Image (tube, rainbow, N blue to C red):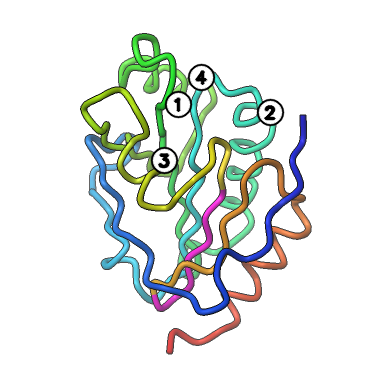
Amino acid sequence: MSIAPKAPMRTSPRIAPELQVSQWLSTDDAPTLAGLRGRVVVIEAFQMLCPGCVHHGIPQTQRIASHFSADDVTVLGLHSVFEHHDVMTPEALQVFIDENRLTFPIAVDAPDGRRGMPLTMRAYAMQGTPTLVLIDRGGRLRQQIFGAGSDMTVAAAIATLVAESSS
């Protein structure tokens, strides 16, 4: 099932909440949003057992990572587990990353301790996965798309953010 993308989240952008992460995979560094200021940041929140994530969100994110310059756009994955906790372990996620040849850094969203909504997912008021988050060069949350946004629409939104200054 495809869900139409939502309009921009807010009319006056706010600083994006920092990611609350229990572990990073596919990177030796632990990126922070504050440390990525000056670049557009694209975050794909996903679950490895989510059909929409596997068939749409992750492939789209890989296309974004290969299309845009790493000097302008940083792509991050956020594995946000809010169901099937026993099978979606960091070890299983590493196998998923390897099998799907994912090349961008992937964070494991910090659990809330009650097997509920992970902390970053809650901070961004995400409705579920896949969710694509766009953050501008100034660190402001500019758009959040739940479900399957079209490649053309997403690429245009990212290109617009790349063309803007960070002020």
Q: CA distance from mark 2 to mark 1?
A: 14 Å
Q: Is residue 126 part of the magenta span, yes or no?
A: no
Badge 2 crowding class, 10 Å Cα cut-off, few under 14, some 14 to 19, many 20 or more, is few
Q: Residue at x 51, y 19 (%)?
A: 99
Element type at mark 2: helix
Answer with mark 4 or mark 3, whichever residue precedes in sequence.
Answer: 3
On residue 55, the disc is: 2
- Based on the picture, tell me whether residue 133 belongs to the magenta stretch: yes
- Disc 4/disc 3 C-alpha distance (Å): 17 Å
Q: Quadrant of residue 161?
A: bottom right
How far separated are the C-alphas under marks 4 and 1? 6 Å
Q: Nearer the viewer, mark 2 or mark 1?
A: 2
**139 with respect to 8 (left or right):** left
Marks 3 and 2, how far apart in space?
16 Å
Give the residue pinned by disc 4.
99
Looking at the image, do the residues carrying marks 4 and 1 touch, with CB atoms under 8 Å apart?
Answer: yes
Who comes first in sequence, dot 4 or dot 2? 2
Residues at marks 4 and 2, CA–CA distance in whole angstroms: 14 Å
Q: Nearer the viewer, residue 21 or 24?
A: 21
Kindly indicate whether the residue at mark 2 contacts the one at mark 4 (C-beta within 8 angstroms): no
Q: Residue furthest top?
A: 86
Residue 20 left/right relative to 117: left
Q: Position of residue 122 (x, y in %)?
A: 37, 45
Above-or-below relation of 114 to 129? above
Residue on which disc 3 sits: 78
